Image (cartoon, helix red, strand yellow):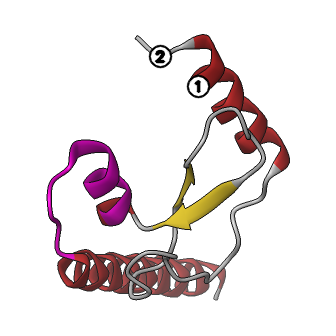
Amino acid sequence: MKSKIKQEANYLANQLIDMPIYKRCQKCKKALAVDKHHEDYNQPLEVIFLCKSCHKEIHLGKKVNCEEELKSREILIKNKIDIGLVKLKDLLTTIK
């Protein structure tokens, strides 16, 4: 169970700190940052921006491969773009 201080720090960070777009992870400098991490929950507005892999590594103590995450995210983004293009083509053909 999360401590009250941790819950409050996470709540404040989520409400008051925007996730920067296209910012690289502050740990590995490779993958895009998608998570906010508190080094000290008593400082709720002081966060670092991390990729999922580095955030897991910090909390679980396991070494992770950011290159694999970066490749999988690129594939995911490409697939979403491809799906969007197919839907757009379908929409355009129904309009004609």
- Picture coordinates of residue 75 (x, y %)? 27, 83
SS at mark 2 in the image: loop
| Region rendered in magenta | 54-65
Instruction: Judge left or right: residue 5 versus residue 73.
Output: right
Residues tagged 2 and 1 counted as in contact (Cβ below 8 A)? yes
Residue 74 percent location from the top left of the image: 34, 85
Q: Residue at x 51, y 71 (%)?
A: 33
- Magenta stretch containing residue 16, yes or no? no
* Residue under pointer 2: 2
**Identity, as a three-letter code, of the amino acid under mark 1:** Lys
Question: At which x and y percent is residue 65?
Answer: 17, 75
Position of 9 compared to 15: left or right? left
Circle 2: residue type:
Lys
Disc assigned to residue 6: 1
Image quarter in which the N terminus is found: top left
Instruction: Residue at 20%, 49% (x, y): give it.
Output: 61
